[in-house]
Amino acid sequence: MLSKVTFTPAVGSAVDLHASSGSYKVSRADGIVGPPSPRDVSRVAPGRDGSLDDTRFVGERNITIEGEIIGSSQSDVWTKWDALAAAFQSTLLSKGTLKITLPDGTTERQTSVVLTGAAQPSFEGGSAFLQYQVNFRAPDPRWYGTTLNTSAATIATTVGATSSSQTVANAGNAPSSPLFTWTVGTGRVLDYLTVNVPTAYSSISPQGSSIVLNSDASVAALALNDYINCGTRTTNTVGVVSSTTEWPVLYPGSSTWNWTQITSGGSSASSTCTMSWRDAWW
């Protein structure tokens, strides 16, 4: 079902755990596709039958891979296994990247993983053949496209609140979290960012049909390379995001996003906000 499976550790070279040729093959894999189990959030309905169900999110993705190493000799097999074992173990220091290539041979998706169980081989006899099983956890359960998409909105220098908007598309089947970065002149303060969700989600989006990232306009002006990461809910400009904000997501399909700035003098240069995202799948 997969034409290729590649594992890339934070330290060391990528290894094709499965490919049309080579010494590594995957004989079985569990947890590769489909959404993981939902995080069940329900409570009794006071004064009536049934429950109130607030289940909305899924848990992490757990992946089990059963693989084989076929070498030219027993020593060759053990050399390959030593390198693979070290790569798996290194995810405890920094996450590795697991990349799959679909049966069409060209479509690639990736996720970040950490080792969660024993990665020990089994072997028998004197053949140059080894079987192993490895368990990974993907804290972010989505698979992402390998291409980083970008959309830039520029605002020319004017006085007062001004805005710019763009239309983008998440080509996957799962929500994706955008990253916003700025190239700005001095004296520019973020007012707010808005993502209008695709029509199919407008009535069911928990954040509403228009997801607004509110800023605290009392903070210092934006600077070059300031960012807001909606996936990790972090920013490098302390206090720029209001405590009452929503965090925009890109649902599958086309969304319109816009940002508004407050100009308070300073540089005459225009300012640009760039949204970056990857298409996402379950």
Image (spheres, grey):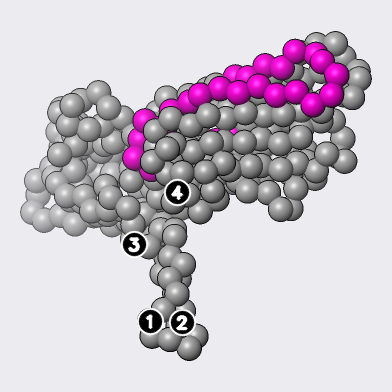
Q: Is residue 25 rendered to the left or right of residue 197? A: left
- Residue designated by label 1: 50
Marks 3/1: CA distance?
A: 22 Å
Residue at 56%, 22% in the rendered image: 166
Decide if residue 58 is in sight here. yes
- Residue designated by label 4: 203
Residue at 9%, 46% in the rendered image: 127
Instruction: Give the number of the mark in front: 4 or 2.
Output: 4
The crowding category of the residue bearing disc 2, from other C-alpha atoms within 10 Å (few below 14, some 14 to 19, many at least 20), is: few
Q: Which comes sooner in the sequence, label 4 or label 1?
A: 1
Looking at numbered disc 2 in the image, what kind of residue is underneath it?
Ala
Nearer the observer, 112 or 274: 274
Looking at numbered disc 4 in the image, what kind of residue is underneath it?
Ser
Looking at numbered disc 3 in the image, what kind of residue is underneath it?
Ser
Residue 37 is marked as: 3
Q: Is residue 101 rendered to the left or right of residue 68? A: right
